[in-house]
Image (cartoon, helix red, strand yellow):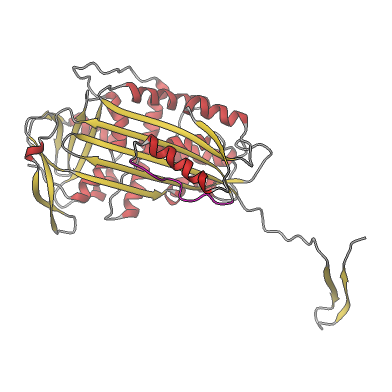
Amino acid sequence: MFLMSKSVFLSGIALVAVSLFSGCKKELADNSPNTRPLTAQEEKTVASSNDFAFRAFAQLSEAEGPENVFISPLSISMSLGMAYNGADGETKEAMRKALGFTLPTDEEINKSFRDLDALLKGIDKQVVFTSANSMWHSNEYKLQAPFIKTNQTYYDATVQGLDFSSPAAKDQMNNWVKSKTNGKIETIVDDVRREHILFLINAIYFKGTWTFPFDKKLTQPGPFQLENGSTITHDFMAMKDGKYLHYQDDRLQLIDLPYGNRQYSMTILVPGRDRTVQDVVQELDAARLATLLADAKETTYELYMPKFKLEYSKELKDMLSQLGMGVAFNGGANFSRMVEGGANLAISEVKHKTFVEVNEEGTEAAAATSTGIMLTSLPPSVRIDRPFVFMIREKSSGAILFIGKLMQPE
């Protein structure tokens, strides 16, 4: 029987989004999933996305401390990927490094995201996976045609102009997110400010049934040990006749539970005795995960795990700045490929929300990421454009030599 702390388990669940990628390479199931080899470009995109996943998760896990964390690296990458297509110069390079893009050209980066998205949507007919993108701009500004075309071509982005001064603008964007996440995420845009000109939004929805479901009749309360040493009582699901991958050593325990045709899975990492979740997080990267999965063996051990529902919301500006993308958020940002006529733009916020529910039948999860683009303040300046009083003074004595007023320049 494997019991794990709630904090341990939920932090491990944050790897669900990572397993969306790693699932592409898992063994074929008897039901003939629609698989194909990844292209070289897709492999690099998976690698860069997973690298971003581990780095982002490590930053957030440390920042959140004992709190739950659950993110969708794919959703974040999609939203910022659209913004990336409007960036240039130092800003673009900073975003490339922070997001882990390694392909040599923008076209290859965009194409690999499009092809990977198509693969994820069609690889397992027993699993629901959808992803949608949208661009919502102020009617007062016109987006550059190449920027629109690129994001429509590779991200299948819906483009919509709105009256940003109207409260209905926020509602329209949030209603879109709600519909694309099957109602699991109701809002992502909290307010539309005067300086906002564009929102780039991604929405992801996932629903998978376990290949070997848990028996509802066996669910019952059990002790759950927290990292602080205290114990709570929580409902545990029980699997008696299932098959899953398992690995255990002194440092951690891995459980890899398949969905549907086994192309998607939930990967859980439980720290060993006297170790913490953060110990696991600090050691976790793509190579470490690949080694653990390679060493895991299929088992039919009885499995007990908590059923739960979790909602997570986070502003990602600090995390992305720590990953090297800070220039995109300040007055030095270069998004000159977004709006016609030229404007000083910067990312105002990157808001991320997720939902996950794990029960006896399977898992339902959703994510939304909104990247807000705003006008930045011009360098401080003073404009004298009305009548004024003026003086000529001697500074050391304070004597006023001349005084007058200018009512109309001549």
- Residue 393 visible at all: yes
Where does the image place residue 2, in percent across and percent down from the top left?
Answer: 10, 43
Q: In the picture shown, does residue 72 fall above or below 393? A: above
Q: Is residue 191 above or below residue 256?
A: below
Residue 286: tell me if it is visible: no
Q: Which residue lies furthest to the right in this view?
A: 410
Residue 366 percent location from the top left of the image: 33, 38
Choose between 389 and 38: the one closer to the eye.
389
Q: In this view, does 153 lie to the left or right of 23?
A: right
Left/right of residue 376 with respect to residue 22 in the rendered view: right
Based on the picture, tell me whether residue 210 belongs to the magenta stretch. no
Q: Is residue 185 magenta?
A: yes
Magenta: main secondary structure: loop
Compared to 49, does 226 lie above or below?
below
Residue shown at 28% from the left, 22% from the top = 124
Question: Split into 4 quadrants, where in the image is the N terminus?
Answer: top left
The number of numbered badges drawn on the structure is 0
Give the quarter of the figure containing the C terminus.
Answer: bottom right
Task: Say if 399 sits above or below 287 in the image.
Answer: below
Where residue 129 appears, as percent x and y from the top left, is 32, 29
Q: Which sits in the foreground, 42 or 145?
A: 145
Q: In this view, does 172 lie to the left or right of 291?
A: right
Image location (x, y in percent) of residue 269: 21, 41
The residue under the point 28% across, 41% down is 356
Residue drawn 31% across the image and 44% down it = 70
- The range drawn in magenta is 184-194
Quadrant of residue 352 in the image?
A: top left
Q: Nearer the viewer, residue 358 or 320?
A: 358
